[in-house]
Image (cartoon, rainbow, N blue to C red):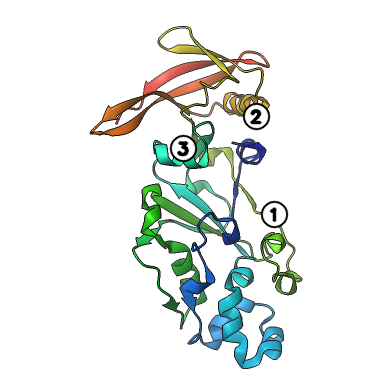
């Protein structure tokens, strides 16, 4: 949890990442694709609207250039939103939110911007180059859909987001200046309506750190006092303002011989600038 993730939640947008921002160096890497057999139609789609200019500069070497710079060329107009089906996955909470952040549940059918997916990641034992011969779109789907099986526990799904006018990516690749000079360089904030936000799940330690005090008033009510952490206050105020279904961990229990978060759905009500009340609505036991 940081100012960027809280900003995305409270202003209701998804951040469409550039592959150079990923923590896996082999994720969407240029080496996954082999363009030696790519026909001219593929190259035109990748370089549009600057194909003739690039072909004049690189000539017959344009396929090798494409292989080396595909991320720069294509992801100037494309971004990736990483998702998972596992809101109770302790591994994900520990690695991506330090158990103190939050995750959101969205309805992709309510997203107003152009996108493809969500589709599941295909985890493989060995990553091998894929020959691209007929379709640039197929190249992107293949490149974004394959990861090493060492990441399999994340059960990742992805949305591909496009903007024909271009997304901000100059700072992600030093070789991008020539290609992106014709793009408007929009930011990667893809806004969605409140109807697309189905719920927010708070991390296992969100309510139990030193910067927040949680007092049980009854079996169905808790009072939360938060003086020290303005980001948490901003989140709780947002949940209260829009009456967002909110899931909180009640305990960590042993279920079917593995650790499992027991979640409860609550309603957050803001009582004052620093005080909130949580009303437990349901217990989401699997």
Q: Residue at x 69, y 71 (%)?
A: 175
Disc number for residue 187? 1
How many angstroms separate mark 2 from mark 3 (CA)? Answer: 18 Å
Q: Nearer the viewer, residue 264 or 170?
A: 170
Camera-nearest label, 3 or 1: 3
Mark 2 or 3, nearer chain start: 3
Task: Tell me where residue 136 appears, x and y as whole percent.
Answer: 51, 76
State the residue lying farthest toward the bottom: 60
Q: Quadrant of residue 8?
A: top right
Task: Tell me where residue 232 appears, x and y as whole percent.
Answer: 61, 26
Q: Residue at x 50, y 37 (%)?
A: 103
How many angstroms separate mark 2 from mark 1 (CA)? Answer: 23 Å
Helix, strand or loop at mark 3 = helix
Q: Is residue 201 left or right of residue 271?
A: left
Task: Tell me where residue 208 appears, x and y as whole percent.
Answer: 51, 21
Helix, strand or loop at mark 2 = helix
Helix, strand or loop at mark 1 = loop
Q: Residue at x 40, y 68 (%)?
A: 127
Disc number for residue 93? 3
Task: Tell me where residue 216 appears, x and y as whole percent.
Answer: 47, 9
Residue 273, above or below 5: above
Q: Residue at x 68, y 64 (%)?
A: 166
Q: Is residue 10 left or right of residue 207?
A: right
Mark 3 or 1, nearer chain start: 3
Residue picked out by circle 2 = 231
């Amino acid at each position: 949890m940081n100012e960027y993730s809280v900003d995305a939640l409270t202003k209701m947008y998804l951040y469409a990442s550039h592959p150079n921002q990923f923590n896996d160096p082999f994720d969407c890497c240029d080496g996954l694709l082999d363009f030696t057999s790519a026909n001219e139609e593929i190259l035109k789609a990748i370089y549009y609207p600057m194909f003739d200019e690039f072909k004049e500069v690189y000539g017959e070497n344009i396929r090798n250039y494409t292989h080396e710079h595909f991320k720069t060329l294509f992801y100037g107009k494309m971004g990736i939103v990483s998702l998972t089906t596992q809101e109770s996955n302790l591994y994900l909470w520990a690695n991506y939110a330090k158990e103190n952040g939050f995750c959101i549940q969205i309805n992709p059918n309510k997203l107003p911007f152009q996108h493809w997916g969500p589709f599941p990641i295909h985890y493989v034992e060995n990553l091998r180059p894929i020959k691209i011969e007929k379709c640039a779109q197929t190249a992107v789907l293949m490149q974004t859909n394959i990861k090493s099986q060492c990441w399999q526990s994340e059960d990742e799904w992805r949305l591909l987001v496009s903007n024909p006018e271009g997304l901000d990516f100059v700072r992600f690749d030093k070789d991008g200046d020539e290609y992106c000079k014709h793009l408007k360089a929009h930011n990667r904030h893809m806004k969605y309506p409140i109807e697309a936000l189905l719920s927010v799940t708070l991390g296992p330690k969100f309510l139990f750190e030193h910067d927040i005090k949680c007092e049980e008033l009854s079996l169905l009510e808790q009072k939360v006092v938060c003086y020290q952490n303005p980001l948490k206050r901003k989140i709780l105020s947002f949940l209260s303002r829009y009456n967002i279904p909110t899931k909180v961990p009640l305990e960590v229990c042993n279920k079917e011989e593995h650790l499992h978060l027991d979640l409860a759905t609550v309603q957050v009500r803001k009582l004052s600038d620093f005080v909130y009340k949580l009303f437990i609505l349901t217990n989401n036991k699997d």
